[in-house]
Image: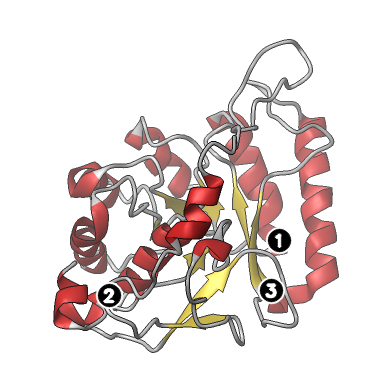
Amino acid sequence: IAGKCYGVPVYKLLGGPTRDRVRVYGEINEETGVNAMKVGPQSSRKAFKYAETPMFVDEVVERFKALRDQYGTGVDIGVDFHGAVQPTTAILLMKALEPYRPWFYEEVVQALNIDVMAELAQKTHIPLATGERIFTKWGFKEIHEKRAATILQPDVCYAGGITELKIIAGMAESYYTPMAPHNPQGPCSLAASLQIAGAIPNFLAQERGDNDYMELLATPLPPVCNGHRPLPTEPGLGITIDEDKLMNQVGDPHPYGPQFDPDDGSVVDW
């Protein structure tokens, strides 16, 4: 709101810009130059059992190796464990995947037991990333102190908003830790995340540079080019929602799909 009132983007109110474009990752796209992506530890099943087998580890490694062979070393590929793998399996996966140079390991376990996360971080030279389920600066304090992660992924919608993420980024900078904000939401979340990227020095990359519901914007965001989206220059978040298009979505159900059975009748997170 202040940005709209003063006629400037939010990042200028926060001392920016610290850059003029924002690296994004999602689906590899030669046309837009996006050369970074994130995948799950994929196997023939959609979900993970509470405890996995060496056969599962071998299958995950073979699938990741195939991706690396397909794209070569010019593409950054992160691996999102989604906190669904137990520590013993996570250790096996981390070591087995290392030769294929993952960009980072995300949520190798859920951020509920920081000591376990810190122990896992000591067992690999690949950066560990976490943050989508952590709230406010206080939630990240112990992560830093115990060096449980070396990439932070706070979500602007969950972790306290733009100002709080600016504070979290400042804390992270003092530990030489980059920020890669989590963002599976729509255009408002993306726009807010871009403002943060334009206001902090320790920015790494922005998840999902093209989100669902982008058609709800009255004016499109600057297009992704060479793997980067230019910083918005319009006031505030730099976007305006087309309210007529939004009203047309009201009452249209969008059920949340991911509920998985790993093949034994149990229900697990995705």
The x and y percentages for residue 40 are 67, 46
Q: Residue at x 55, y 47 (%)?
A: 249
Q: State which quadrant residue 227 falls in.
A: bottom right
In the visual, does 130 lie left or right of 13? right
Q: State which quadrant residue 64 falls in.
A: bottom right
The residue that label 1 is drawn on is 99
Q: Nearer the viewer, residue 87 or 41?
A: 41
Asked if 192 appears above or below 84 in the picture, the reply is below
Of circles 3 and 2, the one toward us is: 2
Gap between marks 2 and 1 measured at Cα: 32 Å
| Callout 1: SS | helix
Q: Tell whether label 1 touches label 2 (CB within 8 Å).
A: no
Amino acid at circle 2: Ile
The x and y percentages for residue 39 are 67, 53
Q: Nearer the viewer, residue 204 or 91?
A: 204
Q: State which quadrant residue 14 falls in.
A: bottom left
Say which quadrant the N terminus sits in: bottom left
The residue that label 3 is drawn on is 75
Amino acid at circle 3: Val
Q: Residue at x 36, y 30 (%)?
A: 112
In the visual, does 259 lie left or right of 173? right
Q: Residue at x 34, y 64 (%)?
A: 192
Please give the label number shown on residue 200: 2
| Callout 3: SS | loop
Say which quadrant the C terminus sits in: top right
Q: Earlier in the sequence, mark 1 or mark 3?
A: 3
